[in-house]
Image (tube, grey):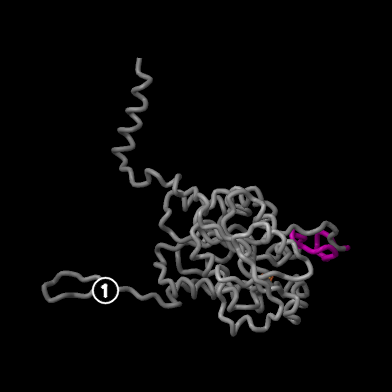
Amino acid sequence: MFGLKTDWSLEVLPRYFTLEDYEGGMARWCPGCGDHGVLAAVQRICRDAQLKPESTVSVSGIGCSSRFPHYMKTYGFHGLHGRALPVACGIKSRRPELTIWVATGDGDCCSIGAAHWVHAIRYNMDMVVMLFDNNVYGLTKNQTSPTSRPGSKTNTHPRGSFLPPLNPALTTLSISNVSFVAQTVDWNPVHVYATLKAAYEHKGLSFVRILQRCPQYTPKVFEEAQRDPSLMLLLEHEKGVQADPAGTKIYTNRTQHDPSDINAARQIASREDVIPIGLLFRDADRPRYEEFSSLGADVTIEEKVQALEKELDRFAI
Ligand code: SF4
């Protein structure tokens, strides 16, 4: 990092980060788990954007995908169940310059963390939120999650779950101040990379629902869509996700969708006959709460004490 000049002063050499600079511990997800591909995509984006590892934070709650921070050689916070988003918002509140990647699962985000999910979307702080949706609680070994399909046999519903599943993309599109919603599938690495890159480049909270394979507990849930690409609907638009055409040419079922149209986004997100992938909605002009919460972050302790004393003096008698 440092070069020694002949006049004995230190010169800081430019740093170039390789993939190894973002690779943490060996991922202990099951073989074939969709989480591996998403991790690789995030590490590639960090490398391609040359993000400083010391200015990057990975935050998670509890679940299989929430082991994410252990596998990133950046700062990380493996939080409590359902609490990834308040931790991430807390970090962004006072350190708005940091890049934040949030990893949360369908149980973590859409069940115990649902209230935090609603408010984090409304706060719209600049971060990428990756919802790893495998339709099951995997870490705790096969319980029904809010996105489990009716009839799914799990330890909590051995005869099959019976409630209709929650639709995370549609739910997010209904929250006020939403600014970015996209959907992708872990088994298409080209599309995952392009979607997460668009999410990273968006200023505001980017919510990306990733349909994620869990060969251990829900091996059949996305099998049909994997085998038959005509069950997918590729969203295309000049303002949308720009994936390498070589990686998306298998999708013959496509539609032009302008991501600034929230009503069209809701209609597409609610479709059950196909799995839409791409950018559903984006509005870069929505207010971001960190612009307010980080005010005064550079105030010195002395200035804070002075301001406090001035305020307290108002009540002197
Ligand atoms: Fe992945 Fe499922 Fe294994 Fe968890 S249980 S690591 S989600 S394959």
Q: Residue furthest left?
A: 7
Q: Position of residue 91 (x, y in %)?
A: 47, 52
Residue toward you, 13 or 192: 192
Residue position for label 1: 13
Q: Is residue 254 above or below residue 56?
A: below
Q: In the figure, residue 267 lies in which quadrant?
A: bottom right
Q: Position of residue 225 (x, y in %)?
A: 74, 76
Res. 249 in view: yes
Residue toward you, 285 or 211: 285
Q: Residue at x 34, y 23 (%)?
A: 313
Q: Residue at x 73, y 64 (%)?
A: 136
Residue toward you, 4 or 210: 210
Q: Is residue 174 above or below residue 56?
A: above
Split into quadrants, the picture shows ligand 1 in the one at bottom right
Magenta stretch contains residue 157? yes
Relative horizontal placement of residue 89, taking residue 274 as reference (left or right): left
Q: For the residue carrying disc 1, how many other residues have a C-alpha within 10 Å: few (<14), some (14-19), or many (20+)?
A: few
Relative horizontal placement of residue 243, taking residue 220 as reference (left or right): left
Q: Residue furthest right?
A: 159
Q: Secondary structure at mark 1?
A: loop
For badge 1, the amino acid type reads Leu
Q: Position of residue 294 (x, y in %)?
A: 42, 47
Magenta stretch contains residue 44? no
Give the extent of the magenta segment.
143-159
Q: In the figure, residue 53 lies in which quadrant?
A: bottom left
Q: Residue at x 58, y 72 (%)?
A: 38
Q: Is residue 170 above or below residue 37?
A: above
Res. 30 in view: no
